[in-house]
Image: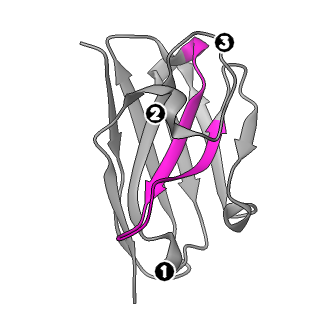
Amino acid sequence: QLQLVESGGGLVQPGGSLRLSCAASGFTLDYYAIGWFRQAPGKEREGVLCVNHSGGSLYYLASVKGRFTISRDNAKNTVYLQMNSLKPEDTGVYYCAARGHVFSPCVAGSAVYDRWGQGTQVTVSA
């Protein structure tokens, strides 16, 4: 079964850090662009950033530049989202998703991502 599983979410105080993981099973992440998306309560899902198959990253949200980074460990078949200096507005459910075709580039729109994880809750609050 082709599956993505996120982990690492939780409750953190403003200014804190979290590292989210996106682990794949049933397929190899190496050749796929992987995006992180988030959905805040009452808002639409939005793209955060993406890593392409060669390791280059693309930011979709200006508000996370300088605070969030994405990386991939192909040996572990996992993509990570490191989130530093967290703010209350970063609260939401975070999802990782894979493009459907190998070597496809990062794209901001969520519709072209075929495989999604179940999401992990991130809450930033004092």
- Check the image and name the residue furthest to the left: 1
Numbered badge on residue 103: 3
User: Dots 3 and 1: beta carbons under 8 Å?
Assistant: no
Residue highlighted by disc 1: 88
Ranked by sequence position, the earlier of labels 1 and 2 is: 1
Disc 2 element: strand
Numbered badge on residue 109: none
User: Spatial distance from mark 3 to mark 1, Cα to Cα?
Assistant: 35 Å
Residue highlighted by disc 2: 97
Query: Crowding at label 1, few (<14), some or many (≥20) Cα neighbours within 10 Å?
Result: some
Amino acid identity at mark 3: Phe
Ranked by sequence position, the earlier of labels 3 and 1 is: 1
User: Dots 3 and 2: beta carbons under 8 Å?
Assistant: no
86 versus 107 height, above or below: below
Q: Position of residue 27 (x, y in %)?
A: 39, 10
* Quadrant (top left/top right/bottom left/bottom right) for the C terminus: bottom left
Q: Position of residue 76 (x, y in %)?
A: 46, 22
Q: How many marks?
A: 3
Q: Quadrant of residue 39?
A: bottom left
Front position in the image: 115 or 109:
109
Front position in the image: 114 or 88:
114
Residue 53 in magenta?
no
Residue 33 in magenta?
yes
Q: Is residue 16 left or right of residue 93?
A: right
Q: Residue at x 75, y 63 (%)?
A: 66
Q: Is residue 27 left or right of residue 73?
A: left
Disc 1 element: helix
Query: Crowding at label 2, few (<14), some or many (≥20) Cα neighbours within 10 Å?
Result: many
Segment tinted magenta in the rendering:
30-50
Query: Crowding at label 3, few (<14), some or many (≥20) Cα neighbours within 10 Å?
Result: some
Amino acid identity at mark 1: Pro
